[in-house]
Structure formats: structure tokens, C-alpha cells
Image (tube, helix red, strand yellow):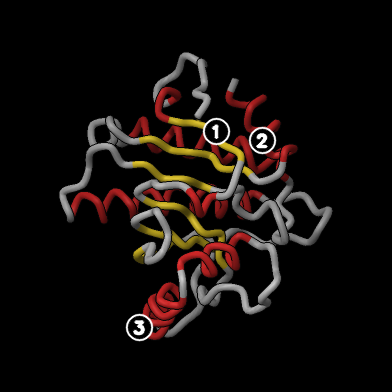
Amino acid sequence: LPHSSKDARGFEQIALWKGDITTLKTTAIVNAANSALLGCFQPTHKCIDNVIHCMAGPRLRAACHDIMSRQAHEESTGNAQITPGFALPAQYVLHTVGPQLRRGSKPSGAERDQLQSCYTKSLDLLLETVSSSKQEENVSVAFPCISTGLFAFPSDEAVPIAVDSVLEWLATHEDETRGWKVVFNTFLKKDYDLYKTYIE
């Protein structure tokens, strides 16, 4: 994975990678979920939610169903839940619901805050999980481009939010996360180029 050379706290802990997030053998991968948290029900749909559920197997949807049954309401935008990775190489899947915009619209301040929360709440939950199981060292997590696909958050505005949110979180949790690695995973070249330009 190419690392950023920018001289700032946390930059040595982030990386950029273009490819299939379901192939990564990380501690966790992040799923850009919908508010029902049960995956995509269109079998041939190419969204990341569908791909992750397909590769993880049916136990992932069952685990998500258990979460939703217990909380008895749709998942809030900007929040996160965690499940095992089941058939995935990743140990865990973090499920987060990003803000959904009208295509072509500019994100509001609240929607920008919600997107930031997707990253920080996912990291908070992963830290809580690995701390309770005494796995704090050598943790790795891969984030997709949350909300930039069907949810229509402009990629050029989402990338700085993603990178800055992660860097600020790592700086705030420096003592607990020295061995962590955060991967920004892209599927489209245009998103890869946006991340590369911003990070470098």
C-alpha cells in the first residue's frame, strides 16, 4: 500500500488502496449500509452493501437482523454497528449509514457532520471492541468512499472530510492506536485520484 509522505501526526498510519474491499485481511472493513442495516436486496446490484453481504455469507444478514430486532428502529445516519466478518478475510464488519443527498445538491453542514460521524463512530466502536478483547495492537481498518455512490455526496467534498476525520481521531487517540493502520479503499479511479491528491 502506498503511504502518504505528508509530515503530520497520523499520516504514517493511513494508506490508500484501489480494489475490492472484501479481499482485505484487515481487522475490520466498513460497510456503507442503508438505514435498514439488512443489506441490499437486489441480487445483481453492484453497491458495496450487496458485495460485502454476498462475500460474507448469510450469517452477516442474520447478525444484522438481530441488531435491528433488539434496537427496534432504523439505524441513525452517522451511527455505526459491528458484526463478525463471517466468511470475509476481515475479522469484523462495521456498518455505518451515511447521509443521502439529492443528486447534484450541495451537502449541508449537518450532512457534512453526519459523514464525519460515520468515520469517527466506526473508529470509536472498533476501538471499544478490540480493547475489550485485548487486541489493541496492529489493528487495521478499511473504509470505502462512504455516501459518494448512490447516496450522491460529492466525492470532492467527501474526501477531505474522510481524511481529516480519521487524522483528527488518530491524534485524539494517539496512545491507544499507535499500531493502527487505516486504509482508504476506492473502487473508481476518480476517487483514488482525489484521495491521492489530497493526501500527498
Name the N-terminal-most of marks 2 and 1: 1
State if disc 1 and disc 2 touch (CB < 8 Å).
Answer: yes
Q: Amino acid at mark 1?
A: Leu
Asked if residue 182 lies left or right of residue 176, the reply is right
Mark 2 secondary-structure assignment: helix
Q: Residue at x 39, y 52 (%)?
A: 28
Q: Residue at x 71, y 44 (%)?
A: 188
Mark 3 secondary-structure assignment: helix
Label 3 environment density (alpha carbons within 10 Å; few <14, some 14–19, many ≥20): few
Q: Amino acid at mark 3?
A: Arg
Q: Position of residue 56 (x, y in %)?
A: 46, 66
Q: Residue at x 58, y 63 (%)?
A: 51
State if disc 3 and disc 1 touch (CB < 8 Å).
Answer: no
Name the N-terminal-most of marks 2 and 3: 3
Q: Position of residue 14 (x, y in %)?
A: 46, 31
Name the N-terminal-most of marks 1 and 3: 1
Q: Which residue is mark 2?
A: 192
The image shows residue 89, relative to residue 18, as above or below, that is below
Number of marks drawn = 3
Q: Which residue is mark 3?
A: 70
Quadrant occupied by the C terminus:
top right
Label 2 environment density (alpha carbons within 10 Å; few <14, some 14–19, many ≥20): many
Asked if residue 89 lies left or right of residue 145, the reply is left
Asked if residue 154 lies left or right of residue 123, the reply is right
In 3D space, how far apart are the residues under numbered discs 2 and 1 (Cα atoms)?
Answer: 8 Å
Tell me the number on the disc at residue 16: 1
Q: Amino acid at mark 2?
A: Tyr
In 3D space, how far apart are the residues under numbered discs 1 and 3 (Cα atoms)?
Answer: 36 Å
Q: Position of residue 185 (x, y in %)?
A: 56, 42
Mark 1 secondary-structure assignment: strand
Question: Which quarter of the figure has residue 155?
Answer: top right
